Image (cartoon, coloured by chain):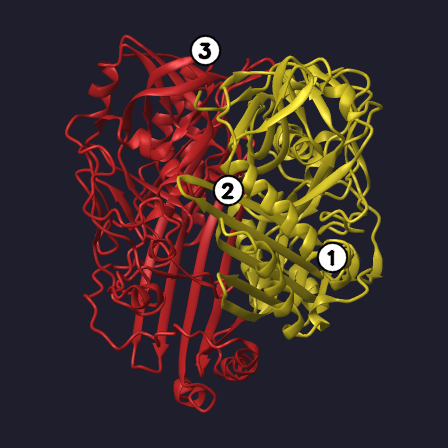
């Protein structure tokens, strides 16, 4: 049964809404661990995700074979859930879309010879291992090239190229008693293999080895509350973890943000958005419900203004859907996710941000982060420096920062005039490619930093 | 069709693993059941080696015709690879323990919907103000088959039923951290009552918020918090690959005391109650109980076939394969931290002033190469004179080897933890002395 017939079949069973996503991707997955390509994989990923709404309840299933049976299974699942539902789920109305979206990539990664990808990883390894203290390196590369389709019973029909590439490196450093670890992740959905013309192995190796060396020779951090200046990468993670998750509508309802929409929650000079950015890893034209992606101005002039929505939660909140329903693959239902979450730049130079800090920390790069519904957030820090009497001092050992987002927002003191983003994968039950970023940011209090001292 | 024989036309050695997974579940959002879903996975991983060059192919199918094409694809990939001078060959044929797990029949979606319906009613009855923000009831059936050209041939079945509840309490704009609990079982019987009672008890206390103090304090880590921290900060050091490369903090320390005598740790995949019950690892090597720490003394590492061969050791049957990438690694099946002798209730009642941690934010940002961590305890609770008097949030930082030398007491109760591939096991609660904490503003 083809996708059109499967949609009709779902309707004939009695489903109020039927949505089928199909993916047909070929992936390359390569892992180079200390000179050996232990993983050299091609993966054929092919299947359908079927979601139906029956009497106000969702049913979802996925299959690589047997679309008719999958529609029937999804219908049965939704029926079972609908018997227990009290407030029926409904979807905000959206215009139907018919479109074919081509990837903007110049060199789609699936057409790059495997030998070239292997050589790229070898080059990175050679560069990072120039220093004797780099005891071990793990370099992973993955890409996907193919097509994806979305069909709904409302008439939306979109086909796109879900091409991507993803690269990560982990270094372990040992020098006598000194130990450290540093990581880097880079991903792209808009630029293909040509992206490595900007993100060269040379710049990657130089940055990563510096982080590792600084961490191995870093001074222990004094635990407690100190003023910090965060660089664009850490600012991005604060935007993502501390605020972005609270502004995902399915979570917002259960957080302090739910009662603050329309209220001043930060100084007037603070603006934060989830939006399309140049080279953003979360960029897309439509979401996985077929809704056009638009910029969401989460904080505008310090006021909590908008949240990220899918069709179900747009209906619940009586708002317009804004294109944030995303599914990791055909085997997952779409849920509300961030894309590129950023603080907008201000007007200060870096020197102005640190000049009046007697003692604090400058935090440059992160390793992991996590949000909680009570607005507590955590961001792991893998590169940072002491600030003493308005000047940068010694590098610090790896640590973490934490705060209560709704308090931290009020304590943003100043924003830099620069802007940069980072690339990563957000886990919220499913993985999603995301970017986050912003300018340098000074936070005068309410950030706790962990440390052994 | 003899797939292995066909593959031998292209390779010196060949391994085929097929997986069939069927997971059915129902979910809760905003105090009501929102959906039911199923996930059916059929996947095959082919790994072939020719002249020491390995190639891997994954396909979302278990059909012979797709596997035949996959073998040819894997052969083309292997040609591009470099020869691995250390390639030890695939595991040899071996005998396995009898698979004693009785896999229950598949249940309808209604079964899981009904479990959640009853739970929602029970929560409303016991605490009308509590909000169930998430939850899931479901069962996962897993079948795998591993064949290789050395005669390995093993098929096994596993089943896990699970029940998760996530609740919050709120007073105006003040929201408690999400309070969650979980029960997992190898039958369809999950203890929903224990999970509901545990969450409701914590929600009631969590509404009273207290600020932690900047100091060193006794901290009791509940099983889930303990497993998160150990999984990211400690267990990577028991990986045999890291022993070979000298990157593990524990390299060369077998037989030495590395933590408190009160702690014993082992991987126990053959235990009938193991969250992941397997008789063979993903390369077809027979699994076994492997002692890692015995009364504080390091007893060994976990090994898969490849790294054990390089180190001149025997594989402990801990080869794990990613069904997303085909990558082979080393990992535990069912990590167990051995129980102590006193009950959790008795340990808490003897705490004069301290903290209990249910879960951490940011355990995954710990440094596996050093054991350093800086995590946020949330939800965490304040204990005064043996009573839990409120909730709090604090930063806890240190080194995992230091704190494991600072164990005051281990509870006699073990809880099963189920956090995907990395975090399956059984853990007690452990009370530590003098941990360094810093309050997070509130």
Residue at the limit of the structure toward the bottom, as seen here: B9
Camera-side residue: B151 or B80?
B80
Q: Could you say where residue B346 lies in the image, as x and y percent from the top left?
A: 20, 19
Q: Chain for mark 2?
A: B
- The quarter of the picture where residue A213 lies is top right
| Discs 1/3, front | 3
- The quarter of the picture where residue A308 lies is top right
- Rounded to the nearest angstrom, the CA distance separating label 1 from label 3 is 49 Å
Q: Secondary structure at mark 3?
A: loop
Query: In the figure, what tint was chain A given?
Result: yellow
| Discs 2/1, front | 2
Quadrant (top left/top right/bottom left/bottom right) for the C terminus of chain B: top right
- Rounded to the nearest angstrom, the CA distance separating label 2 from label 1 is 24 Å
Q: Secondary structure at mark 1?
A: loop
Along the horizontal axis of the image, is B256 left or right of B325? left
- Whether residue A303 is visible here, answered yes or no, is no
Give the label on residue B27, or none: 2
* Residue designated by label 1: A153
Label 1, residues with CA under 10 Å away: few <14, some 14-19, many ≥20: many
Query: In the figure, what tint was chain B given?
Result: red
Camera-side residue: B47 or A420?
A420
Q: Are marks 3 and 2 in contact (CB under 8 Å)?
A: no
* Same-subunit check for callouts 1 and 3: no
Q: Could you say where residue B9 lies in the image, as x and y percent from the top left?
A: 45, 91
């Amino acid at each position: 049964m083809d996708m059109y017939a499967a949609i009709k079949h779902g309707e004939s069973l009695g489903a109020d809404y039927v949505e089928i996503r199909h993916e047909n991707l070929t992936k390359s997955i390569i892992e180079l661990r200390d000179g050996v390509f232990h993983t050299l994989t091609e993966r054929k990923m092919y299947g359908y995700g079927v979601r139906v709404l029956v009497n106000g309840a969702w049913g979802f299933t996925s299959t690589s074979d047997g679309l008719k049976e999958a529609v029937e299974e999804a219908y049965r699942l939704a029926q079972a859930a609908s018997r227990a539902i009290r407030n029926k789920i409904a979807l905000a109305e959206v215009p139907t879309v018919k479109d074919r979206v081509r990837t903007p990539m110049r060199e789609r990664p699936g057409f790059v010879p495997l030998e070239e990808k292997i050589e790229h990883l070898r080059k990175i390894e050679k560069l990072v291992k120039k220093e004797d203290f780099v005891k071990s390196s793990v370099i992973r590369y993955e890409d996907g090239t193919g097509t994806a389709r979305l069909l709904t019973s409302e008439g939306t029909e979109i086909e796109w190229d879900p091409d991507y590439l993803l690269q990560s490196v982990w270094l372990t450093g040992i020098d006598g008693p000194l130990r450290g670890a540093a990581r880097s992740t880079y991903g792209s959905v808009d630029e293909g293999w040509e992206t490595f013309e900007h993100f060269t192995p040379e710049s990657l190796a130089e940055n990563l080895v510096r982080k590792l060396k600084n961490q191995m020779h870093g001074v222990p951090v004094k635990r407690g509350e100190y003023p910090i200046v965060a660089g664009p990468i850490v600012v991005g993670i604060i935007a993502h973890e501390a605020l972005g998750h609270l502004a995902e509508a399915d979570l917002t309802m259960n957080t302090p943000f739910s009662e603050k929409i329309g209220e001043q929650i930060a100084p007037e000079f603070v603006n934060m958005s989830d939006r399309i950015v140049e080279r953003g890893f979360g960029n897309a034209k439509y979401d996985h419900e077929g809704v056009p992606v638009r910029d969401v101005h989460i904080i505008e002039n310090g006021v909590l203004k908008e949240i990220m929505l899918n069709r179900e939660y747009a209906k619940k909140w009586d708002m317009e859907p804004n294109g944030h329903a995303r599914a990791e693959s055909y085997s997952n239902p779409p849920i509300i996710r961030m894309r590129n979450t950023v603080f907008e730049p201000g007007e200060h130079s870096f020197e102005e941000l640190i000049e009046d800090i007697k003692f604090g920390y400058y935090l440059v790069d992160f390793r992991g982060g996590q949000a909680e519904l009570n607005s507590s957030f955590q961001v792991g820090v893998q590169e940072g420096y002491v600030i003493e009497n308005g000047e940068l001092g010694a590098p610090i050992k790896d640590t973490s920062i934490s705060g209560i987002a709704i308090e931290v927002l009020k304590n943003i003191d100043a924003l830099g005039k620069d802007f940069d983003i980072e690339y990563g994968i957000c886990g919220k039950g499913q993985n999603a490619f995301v970017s986050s970023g912003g300018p340098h940011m000074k936070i005068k209090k309410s950030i706790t930093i962990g440390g052994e001292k | 069709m003899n797939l292995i024989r066909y593959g031998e036309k292209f390779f010196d050695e060949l391994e085929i693993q097929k997986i069939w997974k069927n997971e059915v579940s129902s979910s809760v959002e905003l105090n009501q059941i929102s959906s039911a879903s199923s996930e059916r996975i059929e996947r095959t991983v082919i790994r072939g080696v020719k002249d020491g060059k390995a190639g891997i192919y994954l396909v979302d199918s278990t059909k012979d015709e797709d596997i035949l094409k996959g073998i040819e694809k894997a052969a083309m990939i292997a040609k591009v690879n470099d020869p691995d001078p250390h390639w030890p060959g695939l595991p040899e044929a071996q005998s396995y323990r009898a698979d004693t797990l009785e896999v229950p029949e598949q249940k309808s979606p209604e079964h899981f919907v009904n479990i959640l319906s009853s739970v929602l009613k029970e929560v409303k009855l016991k605490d009308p103000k509590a909000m169930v923000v998430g939850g899931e009831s479901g069962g996962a059936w897993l079948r795998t088959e591993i064949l290789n050209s050395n005669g390995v041939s093993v098929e096994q079945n596993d089943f896990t039923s699970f029940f998760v509840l996530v609740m919050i309490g709120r007073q105006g704009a003040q929201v408690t951290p999400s309070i969650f609990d979980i029960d997992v079982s190898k039958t369809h019987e999950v203890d929903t009552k224990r999970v509901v009672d545990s969450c409701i008890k914590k929600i009631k206390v969590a509404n009273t918020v207290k600020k932690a103090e900047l100091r060193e304090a006794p901290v009791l880590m509940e099983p889930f918090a303990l497993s998160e921290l150990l999984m990211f900060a400690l267990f990577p050091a028991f990986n045999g690959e890291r022993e070979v490369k000298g990157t593990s903090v524990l390299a060369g320390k077998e037989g030495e005391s590395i933590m408190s005598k009160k702690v014993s740790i082992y991987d126990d995949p053959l235990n009938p109650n193991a969250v992941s019950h397997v008789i063979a690892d993903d390369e077809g090597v027979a699994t076994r109980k492997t002692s890692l720490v015995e009364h504080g003394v390091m007893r060994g590492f976990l090994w898969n076939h490849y790294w054990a061969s390089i180190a001149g050791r025997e594989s402990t049957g801990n080869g794990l394969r990613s069904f997303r990438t085909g990558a082979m690694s080393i990992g535990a099946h069912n990590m167990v931290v051995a129980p102590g002798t006193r009950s959790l209730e008795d340990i808490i009642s003897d705490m004069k002033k301290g903290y209990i941690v249910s879960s951490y934010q940011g355990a995954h940002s710990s440094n596996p190469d050093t054991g350093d961590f800086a995590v946020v305890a949330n939800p965490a609770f304040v204990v005064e004179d043996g009573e839990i008097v409120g909730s709090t949030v604090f930063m806890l930082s240190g080194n995992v080897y230091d704190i494991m030398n600072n164990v005051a007491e281990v509870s006699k109760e073990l809880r099963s933890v189920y956090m995907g591939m990395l975090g399956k096991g059984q853990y007690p609660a452990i009370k530590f002395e003098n941990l360094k904490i810093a309050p997070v503003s509130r």
